[in-house]
Amino acid sequence: MSKDVQCLLCPHACVMEPGQRGSCRVRMNLDGELVSLVYGRPVAVHVDPIEKKPLYHFRPGSLSYSLATAGCNLACRFCQNWEISQSAPEEVPPYDLPPEAVVEEAENAGCSSIAYTYTEPIVFYEYMLDTAKLAHERGLRNVMITAGYINQGPLRELCEHMDGANVDLKSIRDDYYRQVCYGKLDPVLDALEVMVEHGVWVEVTNLVVPTLNDAEEDLRDLSRWILDNLGEDVPLHFSRFFPTYRLTNKPPTPVSTLRAARETALEEGLNHVYVGNVVTASGSHTTCPGCGETMIEREGYTVVNNRIEDGMCPECGTEIKGVWLDEQAQ
Amino acid sequence: MDKTIIVFLAAIIMLQAPGLQGDRDDSLDVGIPLVGRLLRGLSDTGSVAYRTPSTPDLSLIRDLINRGILSDHPAAWTVVRDEDE
């Protein structure tokens, strides 16, 4: 007789009777065995500039082979990719792309990394892990863009094969996670610390939603938590919200709010704070924390000038933390 | 019976009818009171997005696997639950 199974991948810890799926929609109890319904079945595949992730301190100007399957283990009301993240895998036509093909196509496209992104890569854990192992064997880097809602065991295993991550820290308030995202805050904070501990290059994104998480006190607390627990050199991206999915009753984030958030985070002591999802020169360049000179100049997702030499500012010699291309690295 | 009570009970029955509860569609507002959450069949903690779907037609799932739409790759990080748990 088939048995119930429990998934230990993420904090939801879904218990599934035969035939049932977890809350991610893509992990299923099939005859008493937990299976992934999306292994090798991505629904979105693109070649993107790494800046689009956003990762601003990870091989700037390089291309990243980016893919996603259907599914997510959160259900953020503001999800920007809800058409695929909040769908069951049979509702979105997939590609047949096993890990070997992903790596081969990434090489053919001139990419220096593979990005597991768009939806929530944690839900296609096995596919990501196998692809990442293969990519490393072929000299490609791996990055994931994630909400970080994962248990520590699987995360530590994954970190062995992950070079960079942009983690969406949606708020520093637990009630926000519970009411807007259907998750909890603590596992995300734990995941961030585990990634940094394992040497994964981490950048943090915070989507600023008017009236829900844009209070100065919240943004200050979030910045201070990053400073105290991850370090002053972890880049923080304040991203602009646009009304979509189930949060259409809020206006787009005013650019002035994003600028104020950036100022707050800089005041708290973070060295690299950016403004994203908006066309503005202010808040998109990388500056030297030592002398304030512009190190990397960006227009949209394009790097138009990169002055970093040997991982340092050529003006004052201050180290600029990041994962640089070979010609910029120490 | 008072008409207001009848309307109230009818509303509760409708909310609990199959196909209406446990669906994420437009059912949850930020700050919705606990009673409202429970009436809508949602978790009282808000940490679970929706109830696990009921058992589907497995022949359809197998057909989708055979056609390559879905995979049946073994998943990691799982335990089988004993019947007495």
Image (spheres, coloured by chain):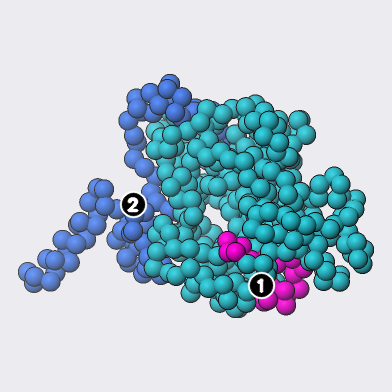
Instruction: Please name which of the two marks, 1 or 2, marks the residue nearer to the observer.
Output: 1
Answer left or right for A221 relative to A1: right
Checking the image for residue A248, the label placed there is none
Checking the image for residue B23, the label placed there is 2
Q: Quadrant of the N terminus of chain A?
A: top left
Answer left or right for B72 relative to A48: left
Q: Residue A302, how many percent across, how many down?
A: 68, 54
- Residue A278 lies within the magenta run: yes
- Specify the chain shown as cyan: A
Answer left or right for A206 relative to A58: left
- Amino acid bearing label 1: Arg
Q: Residue A310, how many percent across, how many down?
A: 90, 53
Residue A243 occupies which quadrant of the picture?
Answer: bottom left
Q: Are marks 1 and 2 on the same chain?
A: no
Q: Residue furthest left?
A: B1
Q: Residue A194, how many percent across, how many down?
A: 71, 52
Q: CA–CA distance between discs 1 and 2?
A: 37 Å
Question: What residue is at 81 percent from the left and 47 percent from the top?
Answer: A325
Q: Which residue is mark 1?
A: A262
Q: How many residues crowd mark 2 within 10 Å: few (<14), some (14–19), many (20+)? A: some
Question: What residue is at 20 percent from the left and 56 percent from the top?
Answer: B14
Q: Nearer the viewer, residue A93 or A23?
A: A93
Which SS class for mark 1?
Answer: helix
Residue A18 shows up from this direction: yes
Question: What residue is at 34 percent from the left and 25 percent from the top?
Answer: B59
- For the record, the magenta segment spans A263-279
Chain bearing tag 1 is A
Residue A296 occupies which quadrant of the picture?
Answer: bottom right
Question: What residue is at 33 percent from the left and 59 percent from the top?
Answer: B27
- Residue B21 lies within the magenta run: no
Q: Residue A253, how many percent across, how many down?
A: 52, 70
The hue in which chain B appears in the rendered picture of the protein: blue
